[in-house]
Image: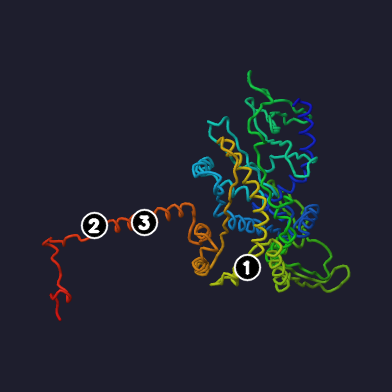
Amino acid sequence: MDIEAARKIIEDNVSRQSAFFSNAQKGFDYYENKDDITYTGAAAIDEVNAYLKKKGSDPLHSADNRISINRHKIAVDQKIGYMFTDPPQFDVIQGQSDDTTLKKVQSTIGDDWTKVIKQLGIDASNTGRGWLHYWYENNSAPFEYWYINPMQIVPVYDNRTAKKKLRYLIRYYQFYDDQGNSKMRYELWDDKEVAYLERLSAAGSHIEYETFPIGSLNPMPHTYGRIPFIEFQNNARATSDLTLYKPLVDAMDKLISGFANDNDDIQEIIYILSGYSGDASTDDYDVNGVAIHKDIGLLQKLKAEKLVRVDKNKVTGEDGGLDALRNEIPYAARSAFFEILDKQFWVAAMAVNPSTDNAGNQSGTYIDFLYGLLEHKAGLMETEFRTAINEFLKSVLTYLGAKDMQFNQTWKRTKPQNNTEVSAIIAQTPNTVMSDETKTKVHPLIEDWQEEREKIVEEQAQRDQNTLDLLNQPQGNPPDNNPKNPPQPNSNDGGGNA
């Protein structure tokens, strides 16, 4: 890989990602409660304030509340909690390996799995895709992995193949060198090597190979056998959840912000003057006592004195008058519109409305119906994540030097359920239909089914041993003649009461 080829790959592909970066940033903004309303304000507010600013006066306060209702975060967190509160577990298909290999894989992945898979779900929901990066220096060094900000990644796919194949991957991020210069670093990966390049933040600077100490290689070969980045798509088209309902969220933001503006502005009164011919004036004095003539806008005077005197117009002779125009809030219309938007949001977001109307001791069938759309959306993500997780597990096997094998993934959903109904169904299902292991997996009260199966095996072995001990006891043991435990009389041996 020479510098000209690397530079062309980077410049051509990074520039093509502007639309993705814009949408991804929008997803992160809405997740952090920074909806568009926080930048633009409610309808026409910016235009009104711009006019008042140009006019040089703002006698009546123009309220500008910018309220973001944060619906996107609620919908995303609901899906992530539903899918990853119990993170996906995996085991090896029977007959392919012993438990030793599985335990090595689980030990290598460690305790970071729960946090990483949740963040990948959040990134994928916000931007359309999440990225996992793994690395290790050699097979004796620790296996490390972590999630990467999707806005740092530019994938380059080989369009010559029917099945999408990653040909190059560009990761870029800003950093400061030892001299304090701001630079952009580019990592250009393929399945055999990685090149490190950099560019000064100054305009017009070129992308060049990064300078390493003597003896270091750039490009540098690697032994992963593939690009060590794995894509976790939100759905088959890798689109953000925000695209499902952004117009509805914006409409609700504007409605709530406009309502708040009206509540603020209702305290202000627009005065209608009859026969008014001009502004008043007054004299002020500087520190030296010199009079300064100043014009006074009538509206400013009204706000200050809360009093107005009205005479006949000196020019036309018309009688003067004063009326007040107060702002009226169409509460009923706004409430009805908000209910329409709110109801449509949960359908468009494929989420569960947490309204109290849906609470109570509901049956399992009703709960399944309530979570139907959310389950459908979660299923689309699970389909893409299953493939990515299998790729990740294969990379762990490569690190361990183990042979390739197939993994079973167990996904659980976290939702309210009628545990009595579920437990009864499991108990009534015969072993000819469902195995004991599967029953343990799906039981609602069991968190770690593998650990539970080990306990069941241990307890069953202990019961079997106890049974053997009883069967192997010698027959016809002499009676216990311990004086502290004398034999008790009973009716059969004549010692009891008749």
Q: Amino acid at mark 2?
A: Pro
Disc 3 and disc 1: Cα gap in Å?
A: 46 Å
Question: What residue would you read off at disc 3?
Answer: 464
Left or right: residue 433 compared with residue 222: left
Q: Specify the farthest residue to the right.
A: 316
Q: Quadrant of the N terminus?
A: top right
Residue position for label 2: 474
Q: Mark 1 against mark 2, which lies toward the viewer?
A: 2
Q: How is the image coloured?
A: rainbow
Which residue is identified by label 1? 370
Query: Given contact means CB atoms under 8 Å apart, are the residues at marks 3 and 2 in contact?
Result: no
Q: Which mark is residue 107?
A: none
Instruction: List x then y, in percent, for residue 79.
Output: 62, 57
Real-space Cα distance between discs 3 and 2?
Answer: 18 Å
Figure quadrant of residue 4: top right
Extreme-front residue of the structure: 475
Asked if disc 3 and disc 1 are in contact, CB closer than 8 Å, the reply is: no
179 sits left or right of 271 in the view: left
Q: Residue at x 65, y 57 (%)?
A: 379
In primary-sequence order, the first of circles 1 and 2 is: 1
| Identity, as a three-letter code, of the amino acid under mark 1 | Leu
Q: Position of residue 14 (x, y in %)?
A: 76, 38
Using the image, determine if residue 296 lies above or below residue 368: above
- Asked which secondary structure carries label 1, the reply is helix
Task: Check disc 3 and give the amino acid type.
Answer: Asp
Separation (CA) of disc 1 from disc 2: 63 Å
Figure check: 287 above or below 49:
above
Residue 36, quarter of the rendered image = bottom right
Looking at the image, the residue that sits furthest to the bottom is 498
Tag 1 or tag 3, which sits nearer the N-term? 1
